[in-house]
Amino acid sequence: MDSICETDPLDGVPIDAPWGDLGRNFTLGLVAIGSKFVLNVLNTTRITNVEGIEEVANNRPPGVGLLTVCNHTSTIDDPVVLSALLPWKFFYTESMHGGNRWSLCAKEICYRNAFLGQFFLSGKTLPIERGRGLQQPAMQTAARLLGRGDWVHVFPEGRVGYSGRVQPCKWGVGKLVCDCVAESGRNPVILPFYHSGMGRVMPEHGRIPRVGRQVDITVGQPLDVSDLTCRCGQPGTDQKQARHLPHPAHLADLSSLSPFFAACLQTHPVSGRNSMATW
């Protein structure tokens, strides 16, 4: 068994499967089938435009990364919601295509002992350290994975919103995109989706999922942010502004998707512009 303390080819944090390819297949497949049982047997799930995520997960050009973003209302949104969006075979055949998502999880939760660290790394989850900011190794590794063409999933709010209210979106998504462009010279595919009902399936302080709830998932359309990424890393450009998402063009794409993204795209005056919002 490989040590999770070994370095990886991307520097930052390890990415190699500590239990080997078969162990990663087993971990992803087991978690996915359990997640599907929770949503499709114990509860009812309705998905709109599932073809949208199937297409970009399986058929995007080689070397082009995929960044998915969604709201965060329970501790099991990832992996449960993500497992509902793709066929089970996609998970247990990871070693054949390498296309499953990379995710981020608080180190003090997912990596609090050696076994959990190996389990979550087998499930393609990287340890994020709260309070260490955007330059920490896990963020650098995520950006490099995105830059080489992998799928990375993040929650722009940065924490669970048990109340169901949308919390302020963080800088991390914009930084990931800019770092990806710097790494690869290509824009990643950015796909938003929205879900509701997960806070009732796993409420705050809940230890086991509830039954008989309704979960709705709506997959949006890929966002074109090339008008922004052209400013990433450019001399004389305020990089905090480069990591903002302008309101008018992109809100039109998302306003019909969910109130979550509408809230994330609220007006923020920056440098005289009245149409900026953080990711």
Image (tube, rainbow, N blue to C red):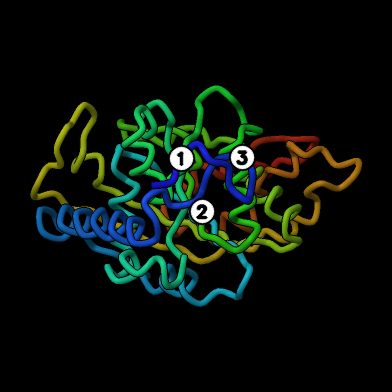
Q: Could you tell me if residue 169 is visible in this image?
A: yes
Q: Nearer the viewer, mark 3 or mark 2?
A: 3
Up the image or down, 163 lies above or below 201; here it is above
Q: Amino acid at mark 1?
A: Ile
Q: Is residue 8 left or right of residue 54?
A: right
Q: Amino acid at mark 3?
A: Gly
Q: Amino acid at mark 2?
A: Val
Residue 10: x and y in percent read: 63, 49
Q: Nearer the viewer, residue 187 or 270?
A: 187
C-alpha separation, residue under disc 3 versus residue under disc 2: 16 Å
Which residue is labeled 2 in the image?
A: 152
Residue 28: x and y in percent read: 32, 57
C-alpha separation, residue under disc 1 versus residue under disc 2: 20 Å
Q: Nearer the viewer, mark 1 or mark 2?
A: 1
Residue 128: x and y in percent read: 50, 34
Asked if labels 2 and 1 touch by Cβ distance under 8 angstroms, the answer is: no
Instruction: Return the mark for residue 104.
Output: none
Instruction: Give the class, few, some or many, for how many residues have Cα within 10 Å of label 1's Cα (few <14, many ≥20).
Output: many
Asked if labels 2 and 3 touch by Cβ distance under 8 angstroms, the answer is: no
Up the image or down, 275 lies above or below 151; here it is above
Instruction: Return the mark for residue 4.
Output: 1
Which residue appears at 53% of the width and 43% of the height? Answer: 14
Up the image or down, 108 lies above or below 155; here it is above
Element type where label 1 sits in the image: loop
First reached walking from the N terminus: tag 1 or tag 3: 1
Which residue is labeled 3 in the image?
A: 12
First reached walking from the N terminus: tag 1 or tag 2: 1
